[in-house]
Amino acid sequence: MPTIQVRVKPNSRASTLEQGSDGVWLARLKAPPVDGKANAELVALIAKQFGCRKADVVIRSGAGGRMKLVRIDAP
């Protein structure tokens, strides 16, 4: 069950997920930070990146902020 730290930038032109040199992942999301849309897009993006189901991705902390701790429960 790895936990990753993610810095989120909503309202970007394209949705991307890349790991920085400091180990923190940078997620650029098309969705605005309204009604959980950005968090839902982040979960989908992480699931696609790590080859797991969306249900296996949990935002542990920071759901309302730019810095998030995300747990991946993939087997």
Image: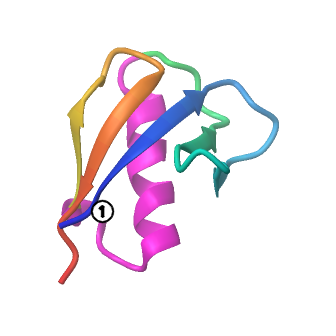
Give the residue displayed 33% in from the left and 76% down from the top: 52
Q: Quadrant of the C terminus?
A: bottom left
> Residue under circle 1?
54
Q: Nearer the viewer, residue 37 or 50?
A: 50
- Within 10 Å of disc 1 (Cα), the crowding (few <14, some 14-19, many 20+) is some
Instruction: Say if 70 sits above or below 66 in the image.
Output: below
Give the residue displayed 30% in from the left and 46% down from the top: 70
- Residue 28 is situated, as x and y percent measured from the top left of the image, at 66, 39
Give the residue displayed 39% in from the left and 41% down from the top: 40
- Residue 12 is situated, as x and y percent measured from the top left of the image, at 75, 31
- Residue 45 is situated, as x and y percent measured from the top left of the image, at 51, 57
Q: Nearer the viewer, residue 35 or 71?
A: 71
Q: Which residues are magenta?
A: 35-56
Decide if residue 42 is on the left or right side of residue 30: left
Asked which quadrant contains residue 11, the reply is top right
**Would residue 40 be counted in the magenta stretch?**
yes
Asked which quadrant contains residue 22, the reply is top right
Instruction: Say if 10 sits above or below 39 in the image.
Output: above
Give the residue displayed 48% in from the left and 31% down from the top: 38
Instruction: Say if 59 sits above or below 75 in the image.
Output: above
Residue furthest out toward the front: 22
SS assignment for the magenta stretch, majority: helix
Q: Nearer the viewer, residue 31 or 68?
A: 68
Decide if residue 64 is on the left or right side of residue 10: left
| Amino acid at dot 1 | Lys
- Dot 1 falls on a residue whose secondary structure is helix
- Residue 36 is situated, as x and y percent measured from the top left of the image, at 36, 26
Q: Quadrant of the N terminus?
A: bottom left
